[in-house]
Amino acid sequence: MIEGLVGSHPGVAAVAALYAIALLVSAPAALARRRGAVLAGFALFSVAFLANTVVILLRWAEAGRPPFKTLFETMVFYPWCVALVTLILVGLHRLFVLVPFSSAVSLAGLGYALYRPDVELVNLPPALQSGWFVPHVVTYFVAYAGLFASFVLAGLALVRKKGEPAPEAAPGMEDHAHRAAIFGVTALTLGLVMGAAWGKFAWGDYWSWDPKENWALVTWLAYVAYLHLRIVPGWKGARSMWLLVVSFGAVVFTYLGMNLLPAAGKSLHVYQ
């Protein structure tokens, strides 16, 4: 079985193996706070990101179109977005603690891609052959990556014991989670606006009440509610962090749960 999974997409399997090695090195290093091991895990994670980039570019060349149409392709692309956001956050804020979590979710995505690979290349339908396709999809997936980072950081803020010294430099984990959420919501808003503009250009309506459009709006409203409640007295701290954790469930459902909805069968947003 393993040979069959690897044989169909060896490049994807190699990237998954690199993320697995990065996870195995970075997770114990983060727990033990050994700087050398942390840096080694980060280096491996960076190599996995570069390999992920190569696989995406090769798929793009092979398909002759942006490789964001099928579930398999997005399961290869989303780890790249998560890794990109993680690398930026490590560079800006030294958040090495994200590396094992990002490695794990990237490994999970690529593992599922190998389990459910595309049987053949799928052409883009005419409705998706638009200049809006790449910026809209990329912006959304970068937003999902930023919101994943805020989810992880919010969870870490919740589980940290009182009085325990912070493993990261100031500001605290809650502030980092909030900043990641602001970035994610900003990208989410841009993606939503671009999608509406694309809809007006292609179909004459800004909004068609497509099931995925509706859930994208639900996700956006959940995070906007977080941003508003955070400035309300009494909502900073654990309450706002729990809201970030719960809101990420809407992101997951919007991305992966559309096939569960009976009205989603004819949607252009449902991945094949």
Image: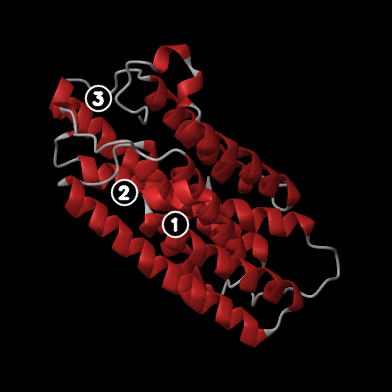
* Front label number (3 vs 1): 1
In the image, is residue 75 above or below residue 267?
A: below
Q: Earlier in the sequence, mark 3 or mark 1?
A: 1
Q: CA distance from mark 2 to mark 3?
A: 20 Å
Q: Earlier in the sequence, mark 1 or mark 2?
A: 1
Residue 33 percent across, percent down from the top left: 72, 79
Circle on res. 272: none
Q: CA distance from mark 3 to mark 1?
A: 40 Å
Q: Coloring scheme of the render?
A: secondary structure
The residue beneath circle 2 is 138
Residue at position x 35%, y 17% in the image: 209
The residue beneath circle 3 is 206
Instruction: Look at the numbered disc 3 and give the secondary structure of its residue.
Output: loop
Q: Amino acid at mark 3?
A: Tyr
Q: Is residue 156 left or right of residue 76?
A: right
Instruction: Look at the numbered disc 2 and give the secondary structure of its residue.
Output: helix
